[in-house]
Image: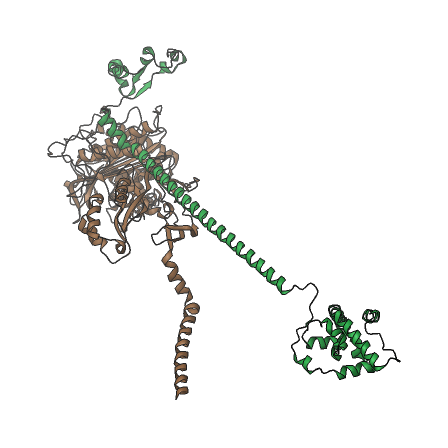
Amino acid sequence: MGRARAFKMLLVVGAVFGVICAKLVAIQGFDSASYLAAGGSEWRQTITLPGERGAILDRHGYELAMSVPQTTIYADPHQVGNAPAEAASLAPVLGVAATTLQREMGENASFVYLARTVDDATAKKVTGLNLAGVYELAEPKRFYPAGQLASPLLGRVGTDGTGLSGLEYKFDSTLAGQAGREVEETDPRGRQLPGGIQSYQAPVAGQDVVLSIDEPLQYQAEQALAQALVAAKAHRGIALLMDTRTGEVLADAELGIPQGTTAGTPAVPVAFPAPPGTTGPQVQPVEEPSATSFTDVYEPGSVNKLITISAALQEGVIKPSDVFTIPNSYTVAGTVFHDAEPHPTEHWTVTDILANSSNIGTTEIAQRLGKTDLMKFIHSYGLGSTTGIGFPGESAGLLPTYWSGTSIADVPIGQGIAVTALQMLAAYNTIANGGVYVPPRLVDATIDAKGGEHLVAMAPTKRVVSSNVAAEMTTMLDEVVRVGTGTAANLDPYTVAGKTGTALVPSPSGGYEVGHYVASFAGFVPAEQPRITGMVVIDDTPDYGAAASAPTFATIARDALEELSIPPMPKEPPAAGVPLATTATATGAGEVAGAPIPGLDATARPADGGAPAPAPGAAPASGATTGSRSSPQSG
Amino acid sequence: MRRMSEGHGAPGTRRVPERARPSEARAAAAARLAGATANADSVRRRMAEAARRAEEAGGRAPVTRLAARRPSRPAAPAARASGPVPGRARAMANPSASDGMIGAAGLAAVRAEPVREEESRPRHLKVVRPGTLSAAQRRRRARAVLIASIGAASVIAFALVYLHVVLAQRQFRIDHLNSQVSKAQTSYQNLRLQVAELGSPQHIISTAEGSLGMVQPSKVVYLTPSPAASTPSSRTSTSPKGTSSASSASAVRPASQAPAGDANWPVVKSQLAGTP
């Protein structure tokens, strides 16, 4: 019995020993990697080193957006000793409710944010509290030194520094740096052990993006537009400036009057006298949430007549000196069309038609041109397709998919189509460039982390109309500003070439809203050697483009000419074969050739055309008041 | 003694004289054995040498085999030199005996001696190579090596400790420098941001209008040089300091009001009055 018992005991001991050995083999052999990893995680720490996000610079190198390391306060609730007391200490420093902090510090987690990207003074105070379980880490924060200036264009980044909109989103991969990585051994308090760095991969800073935007011009454009919005009682507006030769967008102001409680902080506070009849504090225009000049479309109205007339000249169906009979009303496919202002039957040259922005005259020209050629040139000018500027959400515009009998009267005068402000600006820039279309551009270069500058290649240009046609159009556009509807854009001694446009605002319920206009002006200066092309769109205003947009264009162009040190050019004779507009018929005919709205005449230019100004606040007469279906558009 | 010396000096070749009597033969053998015992060390060396030679020659020496089987024994005392000599010992003393070179008297003497007691005692003889250290020498050497090792280990340990201390100091220094670099970079970025904010148009305009009391012009007058001012003769009216004098300024007229002639000149002149 004794030996048997001993043998059994031996068996038991052997079995236990075997199990232990098996477990030992499993731990040391098969599962060794996982146990090593688990053990290593206790003292090995992997740190992600954020790559600094690149800056967005204007054409002179001024920072429009940049990232600066800030301090983020976080807590490890497991190491927090007395959460209520620590929360009470932190609350006044961080400006966060103590109850909120206490709740966060009581969570069952190893990491909770208490306050992200606080300033250095706050971080210093938190450090001075020396609280258990409360730590700091560095995080970059995006700053916009110029405030809200150009914010629709620049866009915004999220809390983690990722681009969410605008150029921040478009160039997120370029701006964002490559994160580095460091694996180090630390003591229980998180301090790095001597020689404890196991691996280190340095972060790479992101590239800077150099825009074509000129910061001072951007400010001046926003300032002028803000004044125009207040003076014209408009809801929103766009002001674009472009370098004629290169197609670089120099300024893109996009402002809106805040509706309801959505007021924001304006980049350009406007000290502007309140319009007559208004009471209370002046509502300040603020930057739009997105770049509507690239993404939103509108019916251009009479500024589209440039395309119609230049196409007809290019195709040879008309000459500038051709005289057209312009009745007070004109019937197309059973629909009666009118000009903006009633007038007796006129005999106008093409120059007069453009200077007076006659809808009927333009329709007669379009009928000579025909649908096919008209649409061909509309496409050639870039309408119906994106400009290639690459802005997120850029619209290609809307062109008619169905050509009705009245389309030949609607489309030539800018109704029934929708364009972006940038597209129309590029169309006018084509004439300014002698008939060559220059694709707009917004980014000039990128600068890598080592300081190397990489220029962005220009997109290829294309000829749309001949240089002769461009010269003829330039002369006619000069006449628009000299004696026509655009006299408010006169900037003597500079010669401004441009065109006004006024279109009714579409109603959400269909049709158009009477008395609500999209007033626009597009042009370039100096007409002799164009350097600046501009576009101003005032949306939802009771005023015509002549009164609202033209003077705003003049103000912005004046500032740009000063900023860019562009002197006045010697006057040149009109293009061969182009008659000048008849001053006597240029007033009160096709459209009101109004003086600027009171308050927008900052340049105090003399009313050369002598056109009567509309009464402030009075809605201009519309061509849509008569007829079964007439064009609501006027020039 | 002379014979012993001779016998010892010519190993393996000496013969017993034929006319010698048995008693004399035993005495002679004993004397030879005594002489062999006295020179045991030299004999062993020779045996080892002979064995090595035999091995080198490819054969197997019986003496070597015998020596290998038996442990070595201490040298015979001097009193034994005249006493009975074990036959095996003699055979060992004269390796040639195993080859049948020993005479009959010698063999009888060897057989007559009892050998059981001798063989039962432990033999500690072994063949050692020249230069082999003794146990004491080995102990001394081991002791020296041990002490040296401990010393070396101590030095290495102290060196490692010093190395780690230096490493730690350097690490703290690196941490400190990294911290300074980080602070400097942050400071640079903050200053860069500050410069950008101070240079922004909003700040400039607000400072100019708010702090300095400046106002934006409500009217812009463009001045263009008259044809007379663009001629070389009119340029000579410029003052030596390069600033326009009153006479040269009079050649400038507001272009925007040019059609009005000189009627608006006082308006322009008032704006020029403050300029140098």
Q: Looking at the figure, which quarter contains the N terminus of chain A?
A: bottom left
* Residue A554 left/right relative to B121: left
Residue found farthest to the right:
B19
Residue B262: x %, y % from top left = 26, 13
Instruction: Depth check: give the residue in front, A2 or A123.
Output: A2
Q: Residue at x 72, y 77 (%)?
A: B66
- What is the quadrant of residue A222 in the picture? top left
Tag count: 0
Q: Quadrant of the C terminus of chain A?
A: top left
Q: Nearer the viewer, residue B173 or A282?
A: B173
**Towards the viewer: A27 or A480:** A27
- Chain whose colour in the figure is green: B
Residue B250: give x, y in percent of width and height.
31, 12
Q: For residue A55, say whether it is visible.
A: yes
Residue A557 is situated, as x and y percent measured from the top left of the image, at: 29, 30
Compared to residue A323, the image places residue B103 above or below, namely: below
Above or below for B241 versus B48 = above
**Is residue A398 something one can see in this rendering?**
no
- Relative vertical location of residue A500 with respect to residue B272 in this rendering, above or below: below
Horizontal side of residue A167 vs B219, given as left or right: right
Q: Quadrant of residue A483?
A: top left
Image-based side of B77 in relation to A464, left or right = right
Its colouring scheme is by chain
Chain that appears brown:
A
Does residue B207 appear left or right of residue A474 in this picture?
Answer: left
Quarter of the image where one finds residue A464: top left
